[in-house]
Image: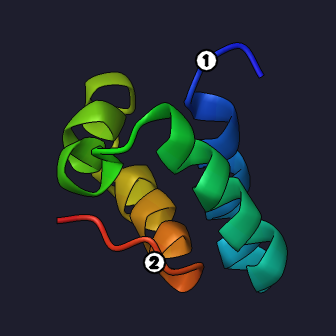
Amino acid sequence: MTGNFWEPLAQAATFGQLGRYEEGKRAVENLLKLKPDFSSRGRVLIEYYIKFEEIVERIIDGLSKVGLKIE
């Protein structure tokens, strides 16, 4: 991993939406290693690049399904 948090973010959200919770939790662990404050800053970081609210909400929903709550 190169330090880019988007890969584990996308994996965690996708695994959450697919119901693959254990894999998603591992991706969350990788995400939090790269961005320990992601729970508090995640929405801002996601919305910076993704401009469609529906997609932002689906990502956040997927993350919550694998245990990552975004403030």
Q: Is residue 17 above or below residue 28?
A: below
Closer to the camera, 20 or 56? 20
Q: Is residue 50 left or right of residue 25?
A: left
Q: Secondary structure at mark 1?
A: loop
Dot placed on the residue nearer the N-terminal end, 1 or 2: 1
Mark 1 and mark 2: span between their CA atoms? 22 Å
Q: Can residue 20 be seen in this snapshot?
A: no
Q: Quadrant of the C terminus?
A: bottom left
Q: Is residue 7 left or right of residue 63?
A: right
Closer to the camera, 11 or 29? 29
Closer to the camera, 32 or 54? 32
Q: Is residue 14 left or right of residue 57?
A: right
Amino acid type at circle 2 is Ser
Amino acid type at circle 1 is Gly
Q: Residue at x 73, y 51 (%)?
A: 11
Quadrant of res 45: top left
User: Disc 1 designates what residue?
Assistant: 3
Q: Is residue 61 above or below residue 35?
A: below
